[in-house]
Amino acid sequence: MVDCDFPRIYIANPAGLELLTVMAYRYENADRNRNPDARYKPAPQILRLGYLLRLIKEIYHMPGQQIVVVMTEKIKQHFVTGQIPPKDGHLGALTMWLSAPPGSTTTHADADRWALEQPAAAMLTRDGDEFVEHRLHRIRKAKSAAEKLRCKTEIEAVQRAGVAAEWRVLEAAHAAFWGRALQHRSYADLTSENVSWLKYRLDNYVLRGRRAISMSKRYELHEYHASLHRAELLANDNMRFEQERASGNAFVASISAVRTTPRGINPKDHRIELEIQHQPKIRLRKGQHVQIIGGKYGGEIREFARTPSGYRASVRITDGIKSVTLGGPYRWGERSSAEPSFNMAYYSKIKSVLGLP
């Protein structure tokens, strides 16, 4: 299921995602059949489908991704139903809970009925599954092509009905989820990065991920998106910032002085002095790169010391020194990773590390 205003893919439950993963491996490797008979060679569309399914799995595990949504998991991230875990894993039961009017006394009963009558994952009902097994047995015993074709048609009809039922549940869950009017917050950087990354992969990058260069690129992208996701959370979620501050990975500091290198003197060594508020734990170290959360400038810590009121740090600013102003306090955190550049220098570096010619 895809939203019209944004390339977002909805999957009903984790079992559906796991099924796509299995299909991705089988379809993408279908061309490894050694049979020379052309009739047994897969169509290019099958290989492309395998690649697209693998891409969905890779996107889902990318930190901060905004494209692939597993509905049961996303609902449980935003709501606590009070149901037992098996019912919380049933999309139909979750949908009944979400769509129930305020004060309804039949919510739990309706959720129980859904859980009993509809499969919890992407599969046929028990009756439908038994019907398909019976028809498969008849196909194996059939003596005429007409009888085989009739059984095959009946099986496909049952499967289409099962897919349509799963689709209706997904549509109902989507409507119920967005109908709860959750607080909206825009993560513009993550959204634009997701869209550009997806477009690039769809257009240009149809390689299998087993090769050393491909694995290195995927790792670099993963690290970049992880740091981007963390920066977005720290900038927009006060609770997350306080958690990071309690663990020592973020801090609050004012800029007490700005020291610029005079014109004509190289190398440049522009610095700012930070007065850091006291906190129980802090993990700053010399050489660490920090930045104002939500801001565009930061630098490298050159000196760090304890003071009677907290801590003091000297930060070498690599860019943006003219926009630095005294005052604060500002919220600070570790600087996000730079966007990876896959140019020839990158390939040469990876090849030298791996010992490749």
Image (cartoon, rainbow, N blue to C red):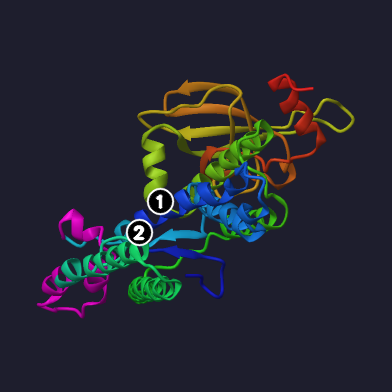
Amino acid carrying label 2: it is Asn
- Callout 1 environment at 10 Å: few (<14), some (14 to 19), or many (20+)? few
Q: Name the residue under label 1.
A: 18
| In the rendered image, the vertical position of residue 37 relative to residue 267, given as above or below | below
Q: Which of 325 and 139 is in front in this view?
A: 139
Quarter of the picture holding the C terminus: top right
Tell me if I can see residue 336 in this picture.
no
Q: Nearer the viewer, residue 305 or 185?
A: 185
Residue 334 in the image, given as x and y percentages of width and height: 54, 36
Secondary structure beneath label 1: helix
Q: Nearer the viewer, mark 2 or mark 1?
A: 1
The residues tagged by marks 2 and 1 sit, at their Cα atoms, a distance apart of 9 Å
Residue 229 in the image, given as x and y percentages of width and height: 51, 48
Q: Which of 313 and 6 is in front in this view?
A: 6
Q: Name the residue under label 2.
A: 13
Which residue occupies 65% across, 47% down? 296
Q: Which of 189 and 58 is in front in this view?
A: 58
Rendered image quadrant of residue 256: top right
The stretch in magenta equals: 83-112
Choose the circle earlier in sequence order: 2 or 1: 2
Left or right, 327 with respect to 248, comes to right
Tell me if I can see residue 161 in this picture.
yes
Which residue occupies 41% across, 39% down? 244
Rendered image quadrant of residue 165: bottom left
Magenta residues: mostly which secondary structure? helix
Residue 50 in the image, given as x and y percentages of width and height: 56, 53
- Callout 2 environment at 10 Å: few (<14), some (14 to 19), or many (20+)? many
